[in-house]
Amino acid sequence: MGTNTARVAYRGTGQSMGDLVAGQVDFGCDQITNVVPQVEAGTIKALAIATVERSPSLQDTPTTAEAGLPEFQVLGVAGPVCTQRHAQGRDRQVKRRAGQSSR
């Protein structure tokens, strides 16, 4: 990105958004659903959105590529380590209950 940054780990949006609004941190990355109300209230400014196209919720906010940061991507999906095992076990349960074989 051409600048040095430090990662600040938060346990949730409440604390991180509070610090952003209070000016305790220079910028943050969060889900659009958490950012839009603060942008609309005028307590923070959306600098860019890390999607391929602009969001209908933040139409005046450029994508990271449009803002000159095409390599900046923060989107991802995460879950507990056991998520896949849990989902597979749940799938087998449902199939058994339906009288189908999971094999």
Image (cartoon, rainbow, N blue to C red):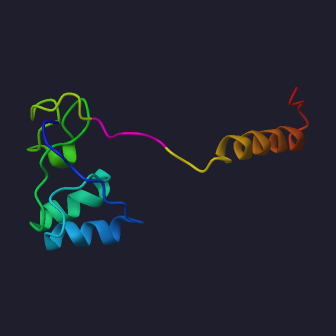
Per the image, is 76 magenta?
yes
* Residue visible at 12% across and 48% down in the picture: 47
| Residues in magenta, as a range | 73-77
* Residue visible at 73% across and 47% down in the picture: 86
Q: Quadrant of the N terminus?
A: top left
Question: Horizontally, is 80 left or right of 62 in the view?
Answer: right
Viewer-proximal residue among 2 and 53:
2
| Among the 4 quarters of the image, the one containing residue 84 | top right
| Among the 4 quarters of the image, the one containing residue 99 | top right
Image position, residue 85 (x, y; %):
73, 42
Q: In the displayed structure, would residue 6 be above or below residue 44?
A: above
Q: In the displayed structure, would residue 68 be above or below residue 80?
A: above
Q: Quadrant of the C terminus?
A: top right
Image position, residue 39 (x, y; %):
14, 60
| Among the 4 quarters of the image, the one containing residue 66 | top left
Viewer-proximal residue among 41 and 63:
63
Question: Horizontally, is 35 left or right of 12 in the view?
Answer: left
Viewer-proximal residue among 36 and 71:
71
Image position, residue 52 (x, y; %):
24, 29
Question: Horizontally, is 5 left or right of 66 in the view?
Answer: right
* Residue visible at 26% across and 67% down in the picture: 17
* Magenta residues, dominant SS class: loop
* Residue visible at 17% across and 45% down in the picture: 4
Per the image, is 74 magenta?
yes
